[in-house]
């Protein structure tokens, strides 16, 4: 086989000298060359073979001889036992986060400085309350500003909780490790600044690990009001390989039809949204090593839950369900949540005001914060999960229908 410079190709690898009936294997490359990129991953075996992708990173043509050995394939049933213990042992033996003592800016119990910053950052202008009467507006503003600890407007002041403790069960203890993706020179400066901002906020730290997933850049949606503004990007992680060996979560997400039917029983609604939702859940220190990511500027470990991990949605849903259950025990009902979008239903302004206070108090209790600009208070109709909801009325959002009919 011949691989041209910078070329990627799907190759069919075959198991050698196997007499067992193997359906899945974990493939670990053994080729020690920086010119060749092959990712470790879980593969389905058919007729003793499986496909994988090989990339030539060099500027030279590479020739592979017939019978070339690319790596080792371990049957999945050999990896089932004691995987979690093996992963943790690997991480404890690595030179990663277990010995990293980088100071965190926002801890489980927020410092006085963080609380002061949240209070100073918050103002009346952050809340859209023009539709309320003057008395309603004054009463609600007093409650919101008095509970400034429940709001954050920057990475340095977002919440941090261990109300749920994420655990990860792996089908293999072999570390996933990849090379970083290239970043265009024109935006490298901006990416470095963003990495430094995450480090200063205590969300990530520099780390050397056996595990690494590549950082990717996602183009942000262009604001129609500023069409000439330069394109900007947000950082994300390509966790597809890690997800292949991560066991699925059994924690269920709410059924949307049931959820919106319950919400529609109320005549008034408040919607609140978490600030950088997943990043508010602290990952146990012994598990942070697994979520190390690689960039052209070094490798970094995440201290918080990350978007793209296939169990992240279930972990966050478990958190909000715990909060809602605690509110119910204290007599506050009519609170609904799908991920980080929470809806409060009420029959009157006074009832809504009392429920908002209860929700903010429990968020403060567990050091969770909201985006003030994304909160909508005391409305008779809301758009939620693709539907326009009002009292005893549910219909699809009109703009979504037009997108389909005009396609």
Image (cartoon, rainbow, N blue to C red):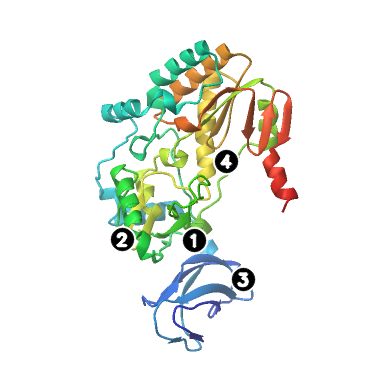
> Is 47 on the left or on the right of 192, as rendered?
right
What is the quadrant of residue 10 in the picture? Answer: bottom right
Distance Cα–Cα, label 4 vs label 1: 22 Å
Mark positioned earlier in the residue sequence (2 or 4): 4
What is the quadrant of residue 33 in the picture? Answer: bottom left
Distance Cα–Cα, label 1 vs label 2: 21 Å
Mark positioned earlier in the residue sequence (1 or 2): 1
In this rendering, the answer to whether 122 lies above or below 167 is above
Q: Residues within 10 Å of mark 3 (few under 14, many from 20)?
A: few
Q: Are marks 4 and 1 in contact (CB under 8 Å)?
A: no
Residue bearing the label numbered 1: 241
Q: Which mark is residue 203?
A: none
> Percent position (x, y) of residue 272?
52, 29
Residue bearing the label numbered 3: 21
Mark positioned earlier in the residue sequence (4 or 1): 1
Distance Cα–Cα, label 2 vs label 4: 36 Å
């Amino acid at each position: 086989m011949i691989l041209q410079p910078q070329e990627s190709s799907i190759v069919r690898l075959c198991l050698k000298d196997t007499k067992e009936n193997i359906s899945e294997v974990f493939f670990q490359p053994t080729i020690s060359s920086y010119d060749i990129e092959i990712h470790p991953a879980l593969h389905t075996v058919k007729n003793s073979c499986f496909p994988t992708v090989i990339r030539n990173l060099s500027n030279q043509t590479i020739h592979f001889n017939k019978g070339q050995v690319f790596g080792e394939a371990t049957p999945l049933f050999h990896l089932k036992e004691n995987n979690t213990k093996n992963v943790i042992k690997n991480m404890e033996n690595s030179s990663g986060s277990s010995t990293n003592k980088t100071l965190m800016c926002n801890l489980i119990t927020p410092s006085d400085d963080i609380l002061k910053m949240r209070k100073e950052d918050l103002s009346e202008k952050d809340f859209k309350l023009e539709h309320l009467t003057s008395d309603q507006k004054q009463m609600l503003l007093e409650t919101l500003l008095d509970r400034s600890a429940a709001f954050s407007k920057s990475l340095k002041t977002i919440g941090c909780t261990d109300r749920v403790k994420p655990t990860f069960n792996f089908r293999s203890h072999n570390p996933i490790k990849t090379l970083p993706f290239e970043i265009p020179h024109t935006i490298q400066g901006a990416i470095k600044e963003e990495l430094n901002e995450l480090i200063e906020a205590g969300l990530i730290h520099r780390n050397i690990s056996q595990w690494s997933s590549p950082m990717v850049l996602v183009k942000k949606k262009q604001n129609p009001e500023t069409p000439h503004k330069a394109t900007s990007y947000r950082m994300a992680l390509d966790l597809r390989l890690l997800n292949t060996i991560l066991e699925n979560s059994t924690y269920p997400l709410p059924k949307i039809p049931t959820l919106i039917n319950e919400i529609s029983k109320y005549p008034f609604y408040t919607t609140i949204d978490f600030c950088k939702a997943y990043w508010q859940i602290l990952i146990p220190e012994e598990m942070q090593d697994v979520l190390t990511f690689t960039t052209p500027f070094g490798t970094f470990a995440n201290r918080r839950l990350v978007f793209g991990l296939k169990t992240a949605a279930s972990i966050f849903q478990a958190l909000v369900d715990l909060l809602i259950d605690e509110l119910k025990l204290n007599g506050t009902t009519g609170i609904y949540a799908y991920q980080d979008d929470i809806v409060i239903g009420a029959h009157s302004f006074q009832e809504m005001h009392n429920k908002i206070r209860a929700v903010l108090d429990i968020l403060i209790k567990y050091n969770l914060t909201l985006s003030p600009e994304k909160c909508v208070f005391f409305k008779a109709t809301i758009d939620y999960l693709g539907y326009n909801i009002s009292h005893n009325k549910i219909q699809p959002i009109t703009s979504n229908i037009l997108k389909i009919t005009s396609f």
